[in-house]
Image (cartoon, helix red, strand yellow):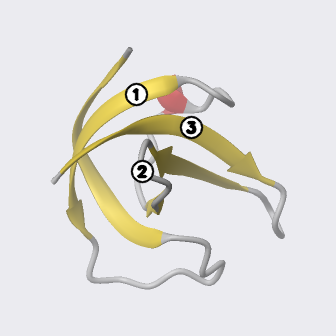
Amino acid sequence: MKIEGKIAYQNLGSGLWGIISNDGQRYEPVNMPEQLKYEGRSVSITAKKSNGFSLFMWGTPIYITAFHTL
């Protein structure tokens, strides 16, 4: 799946990096690259749904396969 949106940091527990897509969907990468960990950064990513689950229950767990900043 292709997702365009912004990086968001949530101060939940030990902290959570996520992506809020341009259409308002929330995604929680299980493998967030260090290069993307900047609040508000615009990104385009290619991802697949993760079979795992999240303790945070903030968004849909995904696995990032490719990305670039906008």
Mark sitting on residue 25: none
Q: Residue 67's quadrant in the figure?
A: top left
Q: Amino acid at mark 2?
A: Asp
Q: Residue at x 56, y 23 (%)?
A: 41
What percent of the width, then of the height, locates residue 36? Answer: 50, 29
Residue at the disc numbered 2: 23
Q: Residue at x 76, y 57 (%)?
A: 15
- Quadrant in which the N terminus is drawn: bottom left
Q: Nearer the viewer, mark 2 or mark 3?
A: 2
Q: Earlier in the sequence, mark 1 or mark 3?
A: 3
What percent of the width, then of the height, locates residue 14? Answer: 80, 63
Helix, strand, or loop for circle 1?
Answer: strand
Q: Earlier in the sequence, mark 1 or mark 2?
A: 2
Image vertical order of residue 57 relative to residue 19, above or below: below
Residue at the disc numbered 3: 7
Q: Amino acid at mark 3?
A: Ile
Q: Amino acid at mark 1?
A: Val
Cβ–Cβ below 8 Å for labels 2 and 3? Answer: no
Residue projecting furthest to the top: 70
Residue at the disc numbered 1: 43
Cβ–Cβ below 8 Å for labels 1 and 2? Answer: no
46 or 3: nearer the viewer: 3
What percent of the width, then of the height, locates residue 33? Answer: 44, 36
